[in-house]
Image (cartoon, grey):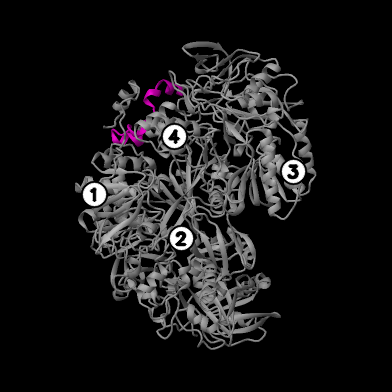
Amino acid sequence: MRYSGLKVITEGLFGNKGWKPAWREPSPKAEYDMVIIGGGGHGLSTAYYLARNHGITNVAVLEKGYLGGGNVGRNTTIVRANYFLPGNSEFYSHSLKLWEGLESELNYNVMHSQRGLINLFHSDGQRDAFVRRGNAMINQGDDAILLDREGVREHLPYLDFDNTRFPIYGGLLHPRGGSARHDAVAWGYARGADRRGVDLIQNCEVTGIDIEGGVVKGVQTTRGVIRAKKVGIVVAGRSSQVAAMAGMRLPIESHILQAFVTEGLKPVINHVVSFGMGHFYISQSDKGGLVFGGDLDFYASYAARGNLPMVEHVMEAGMTLMPMIGRAKVLRSWGGIMDMSPDGSPVIDRTHVEGLYLNCGWNYGGFKAVPASGWCMAHLMATGEPHEVARKFRLDRFSTGHLLDEEGTGSQHNLH
Amino acid sequence: MRIDGKGLIDRTKPVRFRFDGKDYAGYKGDTLASALLANDVRLVGRSFKYHRPRGVLTAGSEEPNALVEVVGPSNQTPNVRATMQEVFEGLVAQSQNRLGSLRFDLLAVNDYLSPFLSAGFYYKTFMWPRAFWEGLYEPIIRRAAGLGSLSGKHDEGTYEKAFAFCDVLVIGSGPSGLMAALTAGRAGADVILCEESHALGGRLLSDGGTIGGMAAADWVASVVEELQALPNVRIMPRTTVTGAYDHGTYGALERVGLHKPARPNLPRECFWRIVAKHAVLASGALERPVAFPDNDRPGIMLASAVRTYLNRYGVVPGKRVTLFANTDQARATARELMAAGVQVAAIIDPRPDAFSVEDCPVHVGAEVIGSRGRLGLSGIQVRKGSEVIEIETDCLAMSGGWNPTIHLTCHMNGRPRWDEDLAAFVPMAGAVPGLVAVGAANGSMSTHGALATGQAAAVQAVEALGRKVQVPLPEAEDAPYRLKALWAVEGKGRAWLDFANDVTTKDVKLAAQEGFRSVEHMKRYTTQGMAPDQGKNSNVAALAVLADATGRGIAETGVTTFRPPYTPVSIAAMGAGGRAEGFAPQRFLTSDQASRDRGAPMIEAGLWYRPSYFPKPGETTWRDSCDREVEMVRQAVGVTDVSTLGKIDIQGKDAGRFLDFVYTNTFSTLPVGRVRYGLMLREDGLVLDDGTSARLGDDHYLMTTTTAAAGLVMRHLDFVHQAFCADWQVRFISVTESWAQFAVAGPKARALVNSFLEEPVDLPFMGVAPVRIGGVDGRLFRISFSGEEGYELAVPTRFGEALFRDLVARAETMGGGPYGMEALNVLRIEKGFITHAEIHGRVTAHDIGMAKMVSAKKDCIGKAAATRPGLWGPEREQLVGLKASAPISAGAHLFVPGTEVHRETDQGYVTSVCWSPTVGAWLGLGFLKDGRARLGEKIRLVDHLRGLDVICEVCNPVFHDPEGEKLRA
Amino acid sequence: MRLTCPLCGERDRREFYYYGAEDYLHRPSEGAPLAEWDNYLHLRDNPAGVTKDLWYHEAGCSQWLLVTRNTVTHESSAVELVAERKA
């Protein structure tokens, strides 16, 4: 069923009785060419691009809960391509290009909106670091504009420019940065994969990975054994547990990241804005809620909920930066489980097991990566070779020292 | 309409307030909702999506409809629940989310378009043409969406945060909460009793009845009086416990000043962090609406809310009331209305076996299937068997039973349990460690049940604290709670589940039809439960409709997760203290005032403030002053405060051995009285920090860290010591704040320093000695960060300001003076000294040309990991100097002249630049691929952001005095 | 969130700095192969359940603590000083 404005009108006229399920609810078959473990954003986009780019449709996505129930459904929805290290730059650049055509690609309005992202800086040193970043973005072919204090004031007049602990020196504007409707991304890829023949199997938890003679043979699940020629692990948040089923110990520590949304408000924040001296980034959703987040709670956790110290830090940062949001009320807070890697960058790679592939370590930047992650994972699984823009996301780079450490904080997992 | 003789309002204190530009009168004790209803104002808002006319539904914080903007003298507050806002003299409120007036909202056209605006419609359209989404559709949607408005002005209100600690936290002050607090209070436990409302008593204030032979309100008053007299009990009215967190920590929001006219220093709100050994959740239950067609008109309210307005506020929301309810308890609302002389037109009870004898018509086995009235209810349609009855009514009190208020028990991922008898979810015991749910919150729906379970939980808590208590349990009603679950009534038209987000039963069914069958999918697809009430009025009914549509039971369908906060909390309250300079501590140098006295602009350096430069008359830009200060240091003498550098005093027999382990180079061989530059790696082999360490005695060193890394290095040293060599005889402590330290640099530095010393010393380069300055013991280091002959003079902090002022005064007599951060930066770039601009966490000793400083003779932190192959080799970028005749910039990237500029051709980047008055050129430090092999090459520097494209010469980073003759002079 | 420091008693989480898993205590000996360092610095069991990890009482007694803790429930069952830990 193709979606369109006309379809919405004709269905509306006839009581909306004709809408079909967005995806089938198939029972798992005994065997597939490929099995993707994980029905989150990355798993669904992997399945979609396996079908779309490589014609591989005998694929199952196994999801232990509901589709899109992981971090793709609990994030601050920011989409950007403002990395500066080679290896990251080309990947996120590719991802942003895919975002830019995603609605028509998927025939699903994911509400990608490029309202511009502004990273604020508060010292000469921070300015220099952001200039290096901005130049790298332009060298990559993306966009960046350096704003001085007055330039920031033109875009964000509501910031506190005069009475603040860390004065605003300027900002790096990434005009193509913005946000999207997170659930819609998962659903759009799910629907697209389903329409191309992929089986999306919910409530199907993988309990074991079958390996014979160093070659993957399939998976054990709560809904029976499923054989497969190739298996992809795409379960950020639970990567260590699933990889352990294949005898792997990953360079991952799991952490909580909290985020917040306020009650609906009339439009007041147009851009995505991030503070440079505390952990705070914010945008306003189309529905009117201010969506904002901070840093990790900083202790290893799978609780998917956090504690007050980081909550309060985020609110305090909001108050020092833009005190006009003070009377907005936080409606809901939530926590996601982040795969934190020792350099803050992800892994899309083969493993020591033939036919078993790994996609993990998205730290807390996975949402914007969804299109390219699936694109590159599909390429890897289909061809056996890393995709050109993901070739540095090697699993062994920590042992070899070929690090992609944008933050420069070193091998401590939670500092990225 | 106000009823004489009813209510707990203070009729001797009339209050005037304004709503939508019109003046009204209420009484002290009224909420905005009760006062508006008393004035027969039923229409108070517009719905989120369809802009339907809406009135007050509830009498509590769960209100989905009556959200207003409260307008203060300096700012306005959106989305205020009229049901919680107490009226006060001069209160100004206005309706929100409307285009035009509340009566004639132009966006009400959406209601006519509703067939096209069903659940998830926006995912299916607005895609063509592509540019129209951002150019046209989205801006329209954004403008139409949202509820209330922020003003855009800074929130200048006062907010506070506080910590509190107690033995027993009691959440809610209905019968179960009061009984728990009384029991724990009498046992001598430290008790905090939080009540969301301004008055204690919970439903006892609304429902009447007797407790222990007393009228319920009198019993409440007597208990409150006793609790107030107990020194170990703290009563916190207007305080909502908003979240349950780990290890007995609860968040709570106190509305301190929102019920009063604003005045300076009156906090609006206080956010509490309450740490409790035990907690009793006595949060009661929330009545639930019934989803029947057009159940959202102003005048259709919850039965318990009607009862509350009658008994607590002396207000009847209509002249001809009807009741639609499926429990015996709800009948009391009708009876009390009739007793108060209000006409009850009919009682509609869907239970076929319900009793039918009341003082008004009763329709058993009947359902309300529709309503009419454009801006307020005027009549309902009732289906009884095959018959449809029209009843004129302007207020319908409805009840679909009750949901225990279990939210806090789910904040730590606890899943509630479905109770078939109650047709409701009840808490899973132990879901929040230390928290016990009692009373209606735990499914004990009678007053007796509330009192008994409240007391039992308190007894359990105080016994765990080692205390004993016996409090007699007063007698109270113990009627059984009996209901027939009724979630939705079939009929023509839309039946609202989620009033606040305009989600109807059709939307939920459509979600199921489209495959969004998981409860989380349904929620996200329809937005049910995502509005300001977070589904308090709709979650269970929506779940029931979904369960029905998918052919599953409710328990099997599952619930979405309740997350903090229980009720929305302002950012300003949780962020109290963060405004303006409160966001982070401020650290001031002892020379701070002296620098400001000289007009120096102070800039942030981490938490410190340091002088940027010291302007002289006639200097118009920072560069003028900076250039002069650089020349002053190079030709005479300059003074600058370097006290921000971290100082760690290290002592013990193994101190040298310890330094050998944390530095790449060797310190155990350093002679007493000498200083050495040291390089410190992280265990992953990259550079952590650099600085000098001095050997003050055989077993005594003083380490210096950079300003930025002072705390980090201290933590690192503590870890290395405690984790790897706790048995070594070494102890250390940060003395950063104990010493004020000033750099004195330049050809006349020695003369200036000696003029202060009681006994002049002749220190070699990299020497240290104890000195006496004006009767004070100090330390003198001969070290330099400028490339000139340099000293650092350290005195106990209390003498810092005096020494600085004196140093500067004497320097000025020698043609010198103070210099700031800008000049300091130029001086160090000229000399090729690095800072954290260079050691930014991604560089190795090899990259900065210090590989030789990693001693081959010993192990040290980071040595092994630094040998990873990716951290060596010519493909890595190495530190170089850059020289140009045109301005260059930090953050620019480097390219081979003549090649294209893009990521693949990128050769490196620039970290620091300056105009060098000494060299007479623009100088830079940067990192260039295989840079040390490329000295003398021309390189192209490109800064797109600043429009720079300059050819530079690649140089040795030491531009000034490369042989170090001046240092050693 | 609260942690009980063996020296200072129960304190708010704000007083502590979290580092990482207990693995950081098992530093390879000098000359160990790089694979051992990889294991030490990067690879983690990362259990969803009971784990031991390292906390620093930074705003307190400056002691590093080895905390036995559940990563799913956040319950902490034991805290000992790193400097005095039993092997």
Query: Which callout, 4 or 3, points to the residue nearer the camera?
Result: 4
Kind of residue indicated by mark 1: Glu
Instruction: Classify 10 Å Cα crowding around label 4: few (below 14), some (14-19), many (20 and above).
Output: few
Q: CA distance from mark 3 to mark 2?
A: 46 Å
Instruction: Classify 10 Å Cα crowding around label 3: few (below 14), some (14-19), many (20 and above).
Output: many
Check contact, mark 2 vs mark 1: CB within 8 A: no
Q: Which residue is mark 4?
A: B553
Kind of residue indicated by mark 2: Asn
Q: Earlier in the sequence, mark 2 or mark 1?
A: 1
Front-most of residues B394 and B788:
B394
Q: Which residue is mark 1?
A: A31
The chain ID associated with circle 3 is B
Q: Compared with residue A41, is residue B907 higher up or lower down, i.e. above or below?
A: below
Check contact, mark 3 vs mark 1: CB within 8 A: no
Marks 3 and 2 on same chain = no
Q: Which residue is mark 2?
A: A414
User: What is the secondary structure assignment of the residue under circle 1?
Assistant: strand
Query: Which callout, 2 or 1, points to the residue nearer the camera?
Result: 1
Instruction: Classify 10 Å Cα crowding around label 1: few (below 14), some (14-19), many (20 and above).
Output: some
Q: CA distance from mark 2 to mark 4?
A: 42 Å
Q: In the image, which residues are magenta?
A: B107-135
Query: Which callout, 2 or 4, points to the residue nearer the camera?
Result: 4
Kind of residue indicated by mark 3: Leu
- Give the label on residue B182, or none: 3
User: What is the secondary structure assignment of the residue under circle 2?
Assistant: helix
Check contact, mark 4 vs mark 3: CB within 8 A: no
The chain ID associated with circle 2 is A
